[in-house]
Image: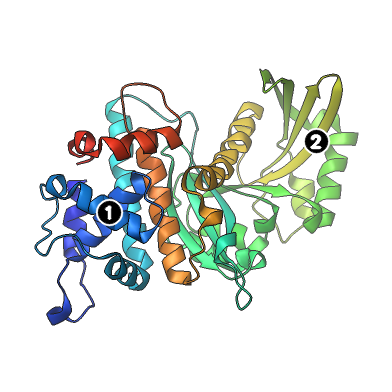
Amino acid sequence: MNLLITYLKSIHDRRDSWKIRHTLVDIVLLIFFARLSGAEYWEDIEDFGKCYEHNLRSVLSLENGIPSHDTMQRVFATLNPDVLINMTKIWAGILEEAHLDEGNFSTFSKRLIAIDGKTMRGNASAKQNPLHVVSAYATEAGICFGQVATKEKSNEITAIPELLDQLSLKNCMITIDAMGTQKEIAKKIIEQGGDFCLAVKENQKGLLEDIADCFTYDQESVVDYYETTEKAHGQIETRKYEVVHDTSWFRKDHPEWPHIQCLGKAICITDKDGQVTQVERYFILSTKVLADELGSYVRGHWKIESMHWLLDVVFREDANKTLNRQLAFNLNIIDKFCLSVLKNLDVGKKMSLRRKKFHLSMVFDRYLKSLL
């Protein structure tokens, strides 16, 4: 946390100096600590600050006391989102270093970065569409490396290249759902030194039909197979993965996809009370992988969807009626940051993130030093 404080102190404050009564460091970190402890509204954040003012003074200057909720809201609404995005990158570096020190090495041959979007429904009104945020999620570190806001879900296609420009993709595997299966996006990933695993669905009908036919009628081309069976939530789930490495025919038939080195198929069979359902999914990859690696990447991508679900469950994001788009975007970034901190915070026993947040609100003074 000391690295974050040093970084925030280096940021140029664009406010008129003669009007500044509360530093940017104090405002940003007070909002962060309060959101981490469950404060939902701006008045709650002010109340949290006043409750723990004595303890917070060991970290923050607070020369003029706790800023009012109006001041915090106004400053946070004008704060450049890049400031918060850079904070998350610093935190990601801290986590990675800690994982290396503990010997927790990656289970993936490449670092997995999942890209997906989420609509902030509470941001909608009669005059504006809800904000849609596309995030790049480092699945093992459990933190977002970058995020871009758009006005429509359909704008993901234009937002993803902008998001990729924020990232260092060398030795990374980028997973994207079918919306991002676009040849220009694939080309950009390769140019930046990364690899991709892209889902193929009906929006790429020609690709889908050719890949499905390959797995259906040419089983001899399947070079590896992997299967898992799990029992959870009252049902039995069987997952099967197959990969094809001979893709010369595919590149010949689809010259606009010159980087395809592997085709993948994932089958999920669910048996619940005797009712069996089966879902098949197909993927194109820019590097040859084994079937168990494909399974790791496909299931790893699910973690970003889990993160989006947690934003609603833990921080009630969809219930937040903030209409200012930049303010809503900044809150989205800080809440994702808080999710990562909560996951890594040791409170002595196992708790849900929602309960851990409530626990922190009652004894924040006990954990303040562990956050530094």
| Rendering coords of residue 294 (x, y %) | 63, 34
Q: Quadrant of the C terminus?
A: top left
Mark 1: amino acid: Asp
Residue at the (64%, 52%) spot, across then down: 259
Is 68 placed left or right of 63 in the picture?
right
Front in this rendered view, residue 349 or 6: 349
As helix, strand or loop, the secondary structure at mark 2 comes to strand
Q: Spot the residue most to the right.
A: 217
Where is 108 relative to 330, above or below?
above
Q: Which residue is mark 1?
A: 47
| Quarter-of-image position of residue 182 | bottom right
Where is 233 relative to 184, above or below?
above
Mark 2: amino acid: Val
Where is 160 relative to 208, above or below?
below
| Rendering coords of residue 34 (x, y %) | 31, 50
As helix, strand or loop, the secondary structure at mark 1 comes to helix
What coloring was used for the rendering?
rainbow
Residue at the (16%, 50%) spot, across then down: 53
Please identify, in this view, whether the residue under mark 1 or under mark 2 is nearer the observer.
1
| Rendering coords of residue 192 (x, y %) | 48, 57
Q: Residue 151: give its label.
A: none
Q: Which residue is mark 2?
A: 279
Where is 258 relative to 172, above or below?
below
Asked if residue 289 shows in the view, the reply is no
Front in this rendered view, residue 17 or 40: 40
Is 233 placed left or right of 141 in the picture?
right
Residue at the (73%, 21%) spot, across then down: 235
| Quarter-of-image position of residue 211 | top right
Front in this rendered view, residue 328 or 70: 70
